Amino acid sequence: MMMKATKAERGRFMLSCFFFIVFLCVLASINEARFHGLLKFGFSRYCAPANGSSEFNTDNSVSTNSSSDEIRILIGILTLPDQYLRRNFLRLIYGTQPPVEGAKIDVKFVFCNLTKEDQKVLVALEIMRYDDIMILDCKENMNKGKTLTFFSSLPELFNDTEAQGPYPPYHYIMKLDDDTYLRLNSFVESLKPLPREDLYYGYVIPCRSMDPFKHYMSGMGYLVSWDIAEWIRASDIPKKQFEGPEDKVFGEWLRDGHRGKNRYNAKWSMYNFPEPPTTCTHELWPETIAVHLLKTQEKWIRTLNYFNHTQNLKPSKLYHIP
């Protein structure tokens, strides 16, 4: 015969059930937190970019999860709208270089407004496929303000106050010729010990000079820190004098504005192709950062062969390249 539970016993039973339910809720909460932690770890461990700690980007965005120690570099290759084959070739050159540890590098092709119907279609296809083109609001020119338009446009294009991205969006901006071969690993290694503000970097002109404060950097490729791009946009000095040899005029802006107090002469790791021999050239050597004046395919091939650019080609049954 079953005995009827007393009121006190029923109360104790209900209280025990209540505490048991609370315990289960707390346990589920802890397990959920652990699960999300494990999930987050799994994504960060196994879903990182395929090229390792560095990124070679062809979009116009700057990663918001980049490390504070990571060097962010924008390389603007000044070229012409009709240079389709050259752009595709350079995409191969920069897209096949090994990952650069500790750096995020964006390479963009820079030219002025399109003027022909075929350009509007073909360039639009490139943008749809690669998203690595900047079209400046200017008339195409060599020495009449294109460089000014490029540098002065950057703060407006990339300083997005609404986005929660890093500041500055890039530590450095490089203007590069489309006949220059830039070796990204060597380039970044040379930048790591340098200041990230008020920096002017390149190959000092004239050829015999080694003093980066005396003249200016060659147009083959020079780099400045982000704060100098902001100064170019805000200052009246560049606006008053922007016509003439662009690299020389650029150096005069910095001189007149007392900018670029930190300077780095990358000579002789940057140099012209050794043929024909001049005072601006020497033979190709391993410590190279950049080789300029690669005006022909033969010169490109000789340079790429010297640096064994295709050494990372994976073996496959689908091809045989001796």
Image (cartoon, rainbow, N blue to C red):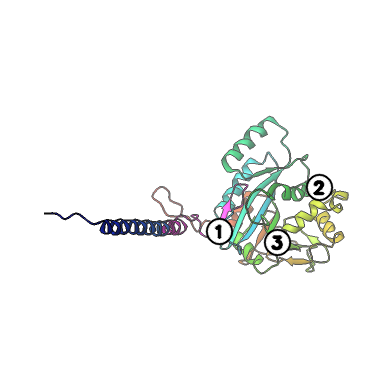
- Left or right: where 211 falls relative to 314: right
Name the residue located 52 percent from the left edge and 56 percent from the top edge: 310
Q: Which of the two marks, 3 or 2, is nearer to us in this view?
A: 2
| Earlier-in-chain disc, 3 versus 2 | 2
Q: Cα distance, mark 2 to mark 1?
A: 35 Å
Quadrant of the frame with the N terminus: bottom left
Specify the segment rendered in magenta: 36-62
Would residue 94 be visible to someone looking at this image?
yes
Q: Which residue is label 1 attached to?
A: 54
Q: Which residue is label 3 attached to?
A: 271
Rendering quarter of residue 292: bottom right
Disc 3 crowd, CA 10 A, few/some/many (<14, 14-19, 20+)? many
Q: What element carries label 3?
A: strand
Q: Which residue is label 2 attached to?
A: 143
Q: Give the amino acid at mark 2.
A: Asn
Rendering quarter of residue 11: bottom left
Residue contact at pointers 1 and 3, CB within 8 angstroms: no
Q: Give the amino acid at mark 3.
A: Tyr
- Left or right: where 298 falls relative to 267: left
